[in-house]
Image (spheres, rainbow, N blue to C red):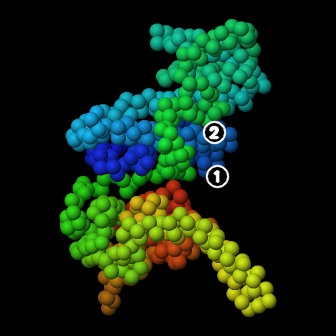
Amino acid sequence: MLQISDQYIQQLFRQIYMGKVTQESLPPLLYFKIADYLKQGVYEGFGTTWTALSGEKLPPGFNMQDRELLSELRSNIYLFSAAKTYQQIRTMSSALISDEGTIVPFKQFREKAEQTYDLFNKTWLRTEYDTAIGQAQNARKWLDIEKNADILPLLEYSAVMDKRTSDICRHLDGIIAPVNDPIWKKIAPLNHFNCRCLLLQLSEGVPTGMDAKMEKVTEAETQMDDLFKMNPGQSGYVFSKDHPYFDIAPRDRGLAMRNFDLPIPKADPPSQAKIEAPAPGGFKPAKNIKEAEKWAMDNGISVSVKYSGISLENANNINRTLKMIFDDFQIQPLQEIKGGAKSLGAANGKIISFKKSATTPAEVKAQFESGVLNYQSRNLERMKETQLNIEKNINRPDVQKFYIKQLEQWKKVINYKRWTVHLKEADIVEDLFIHEAGHVLEDQLLGLINRSLIQKRFRDATPGTRLGTLKAKTEEMRKEWLSIYANLTADDLYTISKYGASNHDEVFAESLVMYYREPENMVPSIKNYFDKLKEYARTN
């Protein structure tokens, strides 16, 4: 079943009760955990994994058709998992209001939420996992059926006939029809949950007469759920659009078309919403800013913390996330976290400072709109203005030359999808601190900004020197990062951010935000390096 802690589940219930998790803002961790679990069923049934099939060299016995089909099945699992997450959050949310129209006490809500969670993620999920196995098996088998149709042109529907056999399968058992008969678009197994039927491919036989065949098929279809009236090998679906999870409330259908703003990772293993997971050591949200500052000091984030200007919600999110990052990369406590930065933020191995005004709702909204939502459209407008200036100054070569050079710069800038790494407006303040934590990592683990701030465990004392000599593994990790940066292509930088492209320090910091927010979109060499850096920090 799902590998999710009881602590996270209880935190989820609290977030739903407080309105932080809603049908419009689904919990990514739950979504990824469901998808991960069901994907394993698909891979078991298909006989290989997406990692194996998406590589440059296909494993023996598989071809490009297999790759394309598994890609479709895998994508369907993510769509299904998002819809499943939506439906259970919707069901839990409906338990917030009493028959009298008032908010119920949390204890009463939690009891109903726990029942809903168990129904969706224990009772139903096990059946869905078995369905994923069966549909994937039959999908891949269908490719073999089509490949061998010239020598094995017929199919026979074969049901396991015992006391568990459904009426659906009893009606279909024994039907023989050509591989290209339209009936197989609707009655190819699986035809219900826990279906055990098979399609046998024959070199010869007597096809079932049209009248008898259609009578059997029609009778079976009247008893079948619409969600099973498909062929997974032709449709690429594990769960069809007729599944009840895809019955979305009208006001949420636009969101559903965007997969509820939940990502479909390009590679396996999939991303997991680490920021949503409970922080090591048992994070407990503070009730006021002073308490949040004390929690950060008591839990090894910094000796001194001043969250002045930051909302309580953001302060709690920052604490939870910094604690996670510091534990992941074995970061030592900072000397200070405070306001006062001239830019949005600044950091080294000892401090993180932030600009207070940058954390206000109005400033956050402006940052998100200019840096993400309107970033490319704004630059397109600038390009158009520059082009007009080129045309206006056709008789002034020196001025025109200036605008031509400017236009070339805009053409490069337009390739970046954002100014800085952000996915949601609500996360901007938290993302700012993740970014600055990237500079802390650079200093404490690698000494890239200020070599004197590297942790002592990564250097050897050398007589006659104040800083000592970096250990061989540390030098190796420093050089590896600088080499990765030197070999980044323009396209690599475009996937990060325009600000990140400034230098290797900002690429590092922006990439740390991606590592926790959208690892599936990271440059592979950088993603692998951060995984390696985490291990280096823990074992050296």
Say which quadrant the C terminus sits in. bottom left
Residue 177 found in image quarter: top right
Q: 156 or 107, which is in the foreground? A: 107
- Read off the residue under disc 2: 69
Residue 56: assigned label: 1
Report the residue at 25% width, 57% height from top. 285
Report the residue at 27% width, 45% height from top. 10
- Label 2: how many Cα within 10 Å (few below 14, some 14–19, many 20+): many
Identify the amino acid type marked 2. Answer: Leu
Say which quadrant the N terminus sits in. top left
Task: List x then y, in percent, for residue 324.
Answer: 33, 60
Residue 296 found in image quarter: bottom left
Disc 2 and disc 1: Cα gap in Å? 17 Å
Residue 515 found in image quarter: bottom left
Task: List x then y, in percent, for residue 537.
Answer: 36, 66
Q: Is residue 469 left or right of residue 514?
A: left
